């Protein structure tokens, strides 16, 4: 079974009397261990699809199955639990907590995890991840003391701290220069191939998309051109 | 673990903006500080008022002997002669609700100094503790008589302001001798002016002397004319008390039984009785217990059976006591109002800042929700922040309140008293203020949509 299975997903926003359909029947499969780029112009429904994929929102109709869990009708609380355990988020604007050290930023998601890790175990896991993203000597720095690339690396470490199956990166390089972007994208590729984490890069930049194994184009709420032809055998 | 991490997150969030945290708590600091200062000043004031009330006699209990009726003619209250100085000693020893006790022997008689004479409203024979019972210990001049004078029946007395002006025309009476029914008393002290009592009786028109002196040297015939105030001074049982002083030149004014006659006849049982016993309860609230204890003790001492009625009466100053308790209650209520207002103001301040904080940290809330915080986690976090703010404010407020009440008592010399109750209440109330006023902002934060919150600029 694939990690992500979308069946005829519709999402309609009700703005007063006008219905605004954003997703008009998206069906999509993403296998475990894939590195997928989700591309589309603004207004194409890209963000809405990402929100649904990230369990931040639920579809108006259709079925969404993530890692064997039926998501469509989960409550907010159950979705929060799922996000905590299965999904990691990386945002365009990093979204680190200000005036909080890199280490504590990475630790933050663990405080919402219901499994009981000791303080020491938590710190060790966070430190390991920071080391992995190359920030071993910056653990006690606050976001304001870090460069953009370093901040995004902290954010990546944070997204991985709960050992998620799926990493959702929303324009992860949108605020970074091209060299730093390249480094980060290589890092994504490395996590994908070494740790088998499924990664979805949401972007409008073809340069970013070319790092992916498969590109899914979305336009006017529909998946364009039979995407399955790009599918490669990257299943874990 | 959960509590620990929530606490840590809250403290971290508060620590990120120390200045704002301090300013936010200021409302609670001032609120709690004001409450504690007010409570302590109020406590002090209450104690001062109680003391003043006590000097009017709010805590005073008067024990008077019961009535005797002779041939169907009732002699009125105080006509029995069953109260003894030993009763007074027993009361102070055995009744824990009684602070002080003074037996009183009354006389109504003329006093003479030089070419002037006067009949004081009160000529009281008593013990030194009378002054303590009446809260009258600080004398205007001179000093009080002591237990030694009582044992020796010393002829010394204290006089009130009215007597000084009537008998001495303003000059110092200390060391002068006045004659009370031909017995010369040395004036050793002048009582502070007390004015009229609630009934309009001049309380300064008084002569105080050891009760033994009044009883044995002045009245001498307490058995015969028991109720001094109703006794006619020209009564036939008038005794010249000189025989007590000069036993050798005693002249018998009436027939005295010879030794053999005394031995033949039955001995009359006679003990020194007093006209009343004045006691002071430990405090206003102890008055009912004091009455109960005194009644039980005296019934036992007077060998009364269960069916017998009391041969004495214990009276309290109900009217004054009521005034005292209502005044105290009023002050407490007033302070409570002030306390509530300042704490509500402080609480609204906290709510205001928490709302600002929620708006300001919308993205942070969105992020926390995205990485898996449940609405309950967000609610708990902001609520904890509010409660921590309030407890912090409460702690600072206690310090501020104690400090300012100390300063008030040191600089302004107002009476203050430490109020543990106020401190405990302040902590509880400030935590509740945190919960009540922190709930709405926290609830608002927990209801945010993570998608909107993440996109919020």
Image (cartoon, helix red, strand yellow):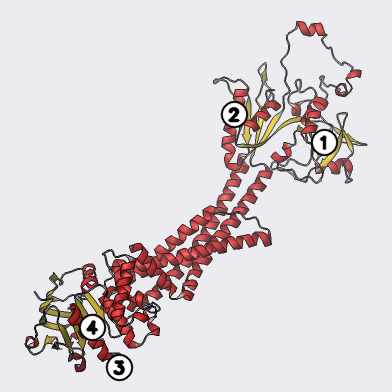
Q: What label does residue B295 carry, if any?
A: 2
Q: What label does residue B157 carry, if any?
A: 1
How far is disc 4 from disc 1 in space, using C-alphas? 102 Å
Q: Quadrant of the C terminus of chain B?
A: bottom left
Q: Position of residue A26 (x, y in %)?
A: 11, 82
Horizontal side, residue A22 vs residue B155: left or right: left
Q: What label does residue A177 carry, if any?
A: 3
Whether residue A163 can be seen here:
yes
User: What residue is pinned by disc 4?
Assistant: A169
Q: Position of residue B6 (x, y in %)?
A: 36, 66
Q: What label does residue B84 carry, if any?
A: none
How far is disc 1 from disc 3 in space, using C-alphas? 106 Å
Which secondary structure lies at badge 1? strand
Say which quarter of the image contains residue A42: bottom left
- What is the chain identity of the residue bearing mark 4? A
Q: Position of residue A68 (x, y in %)?
A: 12, 71
């Amino acid at each position: 079974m694939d990690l992500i299975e979308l069946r005829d997903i519709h999402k309609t926003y009700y703005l007063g009397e006008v219905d605004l359909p954003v997703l008009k029947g998206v069906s999509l499969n993403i296998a475990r261990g894939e590195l997928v780029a989700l591309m589309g112009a603004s207004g194409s429904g890209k963000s809405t699809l990402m929100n649904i994929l990230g369990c931040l929102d639920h579809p108006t109709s259709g079925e969404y199955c993530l890692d064997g869990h039926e998501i469509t009708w989960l409550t907010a609380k159950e979705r929060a639990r799922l996000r905590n355990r299965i999904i990691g988020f990386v945002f365009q604007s990093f979204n680190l907590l200000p005036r909080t050290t890199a280490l504590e930023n990475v630790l933050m998601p663990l405080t919402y995890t219901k499994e009981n890790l000791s303080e020491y175990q938590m710190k060790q896991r966070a430190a390991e991840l920071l080391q992995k993203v190359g920030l071993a000597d910056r653990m006690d720095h606050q976001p304001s003391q870090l460069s953009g690339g370093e901040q995004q690396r902290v954010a990546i470490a944070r997204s991985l701290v709960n050992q998620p199956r799926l990493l959702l990166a929303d324009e992860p390089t949108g605020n970074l220069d091209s060299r730093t972007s390249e480094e980060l994208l290589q890092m994504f590729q490395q996590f994908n191939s070494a740790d088998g984490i499924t990664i979805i890069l949401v972007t409008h930049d073809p340069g970013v998309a070319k790092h992916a194994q498969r590109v899914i184009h979305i336009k006017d709420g529909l998946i364009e051109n039979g995407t399955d032809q790009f599918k490669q055998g990257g299943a874990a | 673990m959960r509590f620990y991490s929530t606490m840590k997150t809250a403290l971290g969030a508060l620590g990120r903006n120390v200045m704002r945290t301090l300013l936010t708590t200021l409302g609670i600091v001032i609120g709690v500080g004001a409450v504690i200062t007010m409570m302590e000043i109020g406590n002090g004031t209450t104690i001062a008022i109680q003391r003043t009330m006590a000097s009017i006699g709010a805590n005073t209990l008067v024990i008077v002997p019961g009535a005797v009726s002779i041939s169907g003619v009732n002699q009125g209250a105080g006509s029995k002669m069953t109260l003894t100085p030993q009763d007074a000693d027993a009361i102070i020893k055995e009744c824990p609700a009684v602070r002080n006790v003074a037996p009183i022997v009354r006389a109504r008689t003329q006093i003479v100094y030089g070419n002037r004479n006067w009949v004081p409203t009160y000529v009281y024979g008593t013990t030194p503790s009378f002054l303590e019972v009446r809260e009258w210990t600080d004398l205007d001049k001179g000093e009080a008589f002591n237990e030694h004078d009582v044992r020796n029946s010393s002829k010394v007395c204290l006089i009130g302001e009215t007597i000084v002006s009537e008998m001495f025309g303003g000059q110092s009476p200390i060391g002068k001798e006045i004659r009370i029914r031909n017995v010369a008393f040395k004036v050793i002290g002048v009582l502070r002016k007390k004015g009229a009592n609630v009934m309009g009786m001049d309380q300064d028109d008084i002569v105080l002397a050891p009760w033994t002196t009044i009883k044995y040297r002045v009245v001498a015939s307490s058995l015969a004319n028991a109720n001094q105030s109703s006794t006619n001074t020209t009564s036939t049982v008038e005794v010249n008390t000189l025989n007590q002083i000069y036993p050798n030149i005693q002249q018998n004014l009436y027939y005295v039984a010879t030794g053999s006659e005394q031995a033949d006849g039955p001995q009359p049982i006679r003990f020194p009785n007093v006209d009343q016993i004045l006691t002071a309860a430990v405090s206003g609230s102890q008055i009912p217990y004091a009455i109960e204890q005194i009644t039980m003790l005296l019934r036992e001492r007077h060998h009364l059976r269960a069916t017998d009625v009391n041969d004495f009466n214990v009276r309290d100053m109900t009217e004054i006591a009521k005034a005292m308790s209502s005044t105290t209650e009023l002050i407490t209520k007033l302070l409570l109002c002030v306390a509530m207002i300042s704490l509500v103001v402080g609480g609204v301040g906290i709510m205001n800042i928490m709302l600002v904080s929620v708006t300001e940290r919308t993205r942070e809330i969105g992020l926390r929700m995205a990485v898996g915080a449940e609405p309950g986690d967000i609610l708990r976090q902001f609520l904890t922040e509010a409660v921590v703010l309030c407890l912090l404010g409460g702690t600072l407020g206690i310090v501020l309140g104690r400090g300012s009440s100390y300063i008030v008592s040191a600089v302004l010399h107002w009476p203050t008293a430490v109020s543990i109750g106020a401190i405990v209440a302040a902590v509880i109330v400030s935590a509740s203020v945190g919960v009540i006023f922190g709930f709405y902002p926290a609830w608002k934060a927990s209801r945010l949509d993570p998608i909107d919150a993440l996109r919020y600029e």
